[in-house]
Amino acid sequence: DSYKTGSEINVGTSTKAVVVEVSSTKLTIKAAGVTRSYPRDRLSTGVAMGIAQTNFNDPVMTPFMKAAYLVTLKGDRYQKQAREFWQSGNSRSAKIDADTFDGFVADRYEFE
């Protein structure tokens, strides 16, 4: 990825986080005067959504990328948010059948 010290990530609608340190295993950011470190495989949902919003250059596909991440998390609220992102993507120029989302969520992706 392209993050380095000083890079900004938009977290939520009004918070900017600044990258303090980045390594192959950890991301350290400072937001609202607080410095936090996250293992890269366990980012907070807000930071992960901020990375998607900040980095994906295709505004049509960004909601689908966010939805794909959210369905990997446990909990009904994440499923609900994922569906909302999926629907917002379809309100733009992408038109992906709503049934596709249900199949996407139902699949357990068990490979033999």
Image (spheres, rainbow, N blue to C red):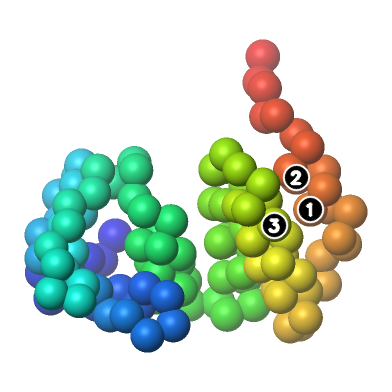
Write down the residue under mark 3: 80
Can you see residue 79? yes
Q: Percent position (x, y) of residue 81?
A: 64, 61
What type is the residue that disc 2 sits on? Answer: Phe
Please indicate whether residue 12 sits to the left or right of residue 63 in the image: left
What type is the residue that disc 1 sits on? Answer: Phe
Task: Kindly state the secondary structure of the residue where label 2 is placed.
Answer: helix
Q: How many marks on residues?
A: 3
Which numbered marker is on residue 101?
1
Closer to us: mark 3 or mark 2? 3
Is the C-beta separation of discs 2 and 1 under 8 Å? yes
Q: Residues within 10 Å of mark 1 (few under 14, many from 20)?
A: some
- Which badge, 3 or 1, is on the more N-terminal residue? 3
Can you see residue 55? no
Label 3, label 1: how many angstroms apart (C-alpha)? 11 Å
Write down the residue under mark 2: 104
Q: Percent position (x, y) of residue 9?
A: 30, 74
Label 2, label 1: how many angstroms apart (C-alpha)? 5 Å
**Residue at (67, 22) in percent of width and height:** 110
Is the C-beta separation of discs 3 and 1 under 8 Å? no
| Quarter of the view holding residue 67 | bottom right
What type is the residue that disc 3 sits on? Answer: Lys
90 vs 43, nearest the viewer: 43
Please indicate whether residue 50 sits to the left or right of residue 23 in the image: right
**Residue at (44, 82) in percent of width and height:** 13
**Residue at (72, 60) in percent of width and height:** 83
Task: Kindly state the secondary structure of the residue where label 3 is placed.
Answer: helix
| Quarter of the view holding residue 35 | bottom left
| Quarter of the view holding residue 98 | bottom right
Q: Percent position (x, y) of residue 80?
A: 69, 57
Which numbered marker is on residue 83?
none
Q: Residues within 10 Å of mark 2 (few under 14, many from 20)?
A: few
